[in-house]
Amino acid sequence: GNTTVVGIKLDEKRTSSDCDGKYQGERFFRCSAGYGIYLSMDEVDVVPPELADEDVRGLAISPAPDMEVFDLEKEFEELVGLKEVKDGLRHTRNFIEVQRRRAAVTGDNAARAVHVAFLLGGPGCGATTAARVLGGMLAKLGVVSKGHVVEATRKELLAGCNSGDVEPRLKKVVKAAEGGIMLLHDVDTLRESDRLGDELLTALCKLFETHGGATEFPQPLCIAACGKRGELQKLLSEHPQIGGAIFSKLDFLDFAPAEMAQILRRLVEDAKFRLSEELTDERLEVLVRRRQAVASAGSAPKNVRLAKTMLEEAINRQTDRVYTKQTLSLDGLTTLIEADFTDKAQDENEAAEAALRKLDSIVGLAPVKDFVRSLYAARVVADLLKALGLLRTGHLVEADRSALVAGYSGQTALKTKAVVETAMGGVLFIDEAYALVGEDGKDSFGREALDTLIKLVEDYRSDLVVIIAGYSREMKKLLETNPGLQSRFPTTLEFDDYSPEELLQIADQMLLQDILVLSPAAGDKLRRILQELSGAAARPGFDPRANGNGRAVRNILERAKRSQAVRLQRLGTGRRSQEELTTLLPEDLDAGLN
């Protein structure tokens, strides 16, 4: 008949009358009765031959959208954020449409193959969703025949492979993606790779060479290379076989907090929950910002992944809450309140970790980091002590002699007390504290401020942290001549001068912020300058204030930048290359020493 049937030979006998190699009275193959069964095609799920392969079955495959209802602008309306991606997709659509009109006029049906690069910020910024929209758009335009999306990561492409296995596996993924989008994740990681990674990169170069350049629509497939923005850009420039085949680079920026709030609201709705009325978009944005502030580590979830994590945690807390209250109503069981999105203990721990990460970003100071990994930067101290629950607010108030000492007798104590009161619950940081009493110790106004401070430190010792700071020699003299200070400030931290290597790291960070680099010769010269600077600081009698550590480095670089600007101006009015504009030469550093 016209009905297609599928036969299966069974390992165990079954009693059905159809289990004998026959289907509706017709024998299709001979076997012992009860050891064969037939089903019609509408009773089974038909797997395409290319997906029957074991190397492909485990990949994430998104079906093609319904072309009768697919509308690009509506799809864009559903996408939160991603303005740059939407603009890039619109440009791709416009180019294809105009190219088709040109072909109708000229009769030349040759077209440029459409392959894209997804330049990512952080993880979870919508690459898969954008690939599905891209697949629908290209299928609607006739660029590809189906529009489905097949995703593969570096790990999936290389797992279990030996030398020589990588290219055949990639070809299987290409076969599965024919007529749609092949979304390749982690392409950026192939720049610094191992042997199998090198094989994969070589296979990708051959693939882009084969499918790039001129083509006719529908093209076999669209390849989307996905990776971190900077590293993927470098790979595309280093491998022109790939970079030259890329039609469009789509820039995925991290979602803003307001956009994250919209995504979180949609995830809540998709999960069949609802948000309480108190959780307005503004409040959700505050919750997102708070969570982002403590989730800034490289391994912490970001973007959509962070929103999903927040929702999962909120549902878990809500579950415990409604169980405890024996809630039975539909609203009670499906409503999330603000408390469900906050975990006080976790927030404090994560805030402490965030504060410690700030400290770790500071160059050098290893002995100081050993003291609770902190107490170098007063702001970090405030964040840390607040996060550890040792301070109520954790805010920082900075002061010096001018903020504490008044111009008339009797007013200094009031002025000092007012400053201390503004720091209650937080940290009061007094810089150059030795200036309060002067070198001869006879400054009566400064002495009054210091005596008032000592008393207030004792009175408010459970609700205030005071840090007095200054150059070592002057601070030692201040403590020696004021016994009350030594008992009120029992912890002393000595900040060693930066080593030449640490000073060079500081210089590199400053140059990076200004998008500048040193030529090799300039780098060697700056290293010698910093070694001389560090050596001078170690000589007896050297005034540490003349060194300034990081400040001295900044002064050198600021003068060098001005010298570079003058040098370039003297070269005339011609156009300067990017390398000339961003590179400091040895002669620029000569000015930095003056």
Image (cartoon, rainbow, N blue to C red):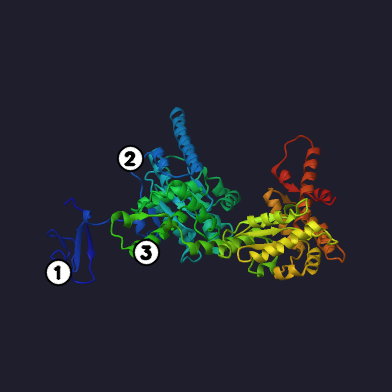
The residue beneath circle 2 is 69
The residue that appears at 75% across and 57% down in the rendered structure is 550
Q: Residue furthest front?
A: 410
Question: What element does badge 2 sit on?
Answer: loop
- Labels 3 and 2 touching (C-beta < 8 A): no
Q: Of the residues shown, which amino acid type is indicated by label 1?
A: Thr
Please state if 507 lies on the left or on the right of 180 as rendered.
Answer: right
Give coordinates of residue 29: x percent, y percent: 19, 63
| Alpha carbon distance from label 3 to label 2 | 42 Å
Give coordinates of residue 300: x percent, y percent: 51, 60
| Alpha carbon distance from label 1 to label 3 | 50 Å
Q: Of the residues shown, which amino acid type is indicated by label 2?
A: Val
In-front residue for pair 53/391:
391
In-front residue for pair 32/425:
425
The residue beneath circle 3 is 320
Residue 92 - label: none
